[in-house]
Amino acid sequence: MTDMSPATLLADAVLLVHLAVVLFIVGGLIVVWVGNRLGWRWVNAWRFRLTHLAAIGVVVAESWLAISCPLTTLEASLRGTTGHAEGFIAYWVQQFLFYDAPPWVFIALYSGFGALVVAAWWRFPPRRTRGQVDEGTQRGH
């Protein structure tokens, strides 16, 4: 039987949030490229694109600065271990998220993916929608 303590449940929730962030970063780039090819205007929304760029920017900065991901650290702390889960879902999510490789591999992968996100900004620049207004315009300047 698996441990169902509040700390374990919270650790599982953190792990699922971590998975959602990874899926947003990877899926976001795919959606930008595919969406632009299919004419989906929303994929160039300023907030979506800025949030996506910031997310991969944090990952790249963490890798270059040798900073452990706060979500990984929090999950491990809640489990009271190195982060290896015993539950079925947690086990498979961790298998998807975590790999054992030298740090330079992750630095190269994250930096390369970040470069692809920047390339998408150049190739498909974000646009403000009709509902978005510059702060200066909003204040009457």
Image (cartoon, rainbow, N blue to C red):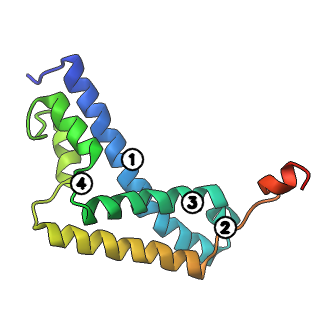
Residue 107: percent from left, percent from top: 24, 70
Look at label 1 and name its amino acid: Ala
Q: As rendered, which of 89 and 54 lies closer to the eye?
A: 54
Is tag 1's residue or tag 2's residue first in the polypeptide sequence? 1
Q: Mark 1 Cα within 10 Å, few/some/many (few <14, many 20+)?
A: few
Can you give x and y, in whole percent of width and height, for residue 132 in the image? 77, 54
Marks 1 and 3, how far apart at CA: 17 Å
Question: 10 Å neighbourhood of mark 2: few (<14), some, or many (≥20)?
Answer: few
Residue projecting furthest to the top:
5
Label 4 vs label 3: CA separation?
Answer: 22 Å
Instruction: Determine which quarter of the picture holds residue 110.
Output: bottom left
| Residue at mark 4 to residue at mark 2: CA–CA distance | 36 Å
- Residue where numbered disc 3 is placed: 50
Q: Which residue is mark 4?
A: 67
Looking at the image, is mark 4 or mark 3 nearer the viewer? Answer: 4
Q: Which residue in the structure is indicated by mark 1?
A: 20
Q: CA distance from mark 4 to mark 1?
A: 20 Å
Query: Which residue is at a point 8% across and 22% down the rendered structure image?
Result: 1
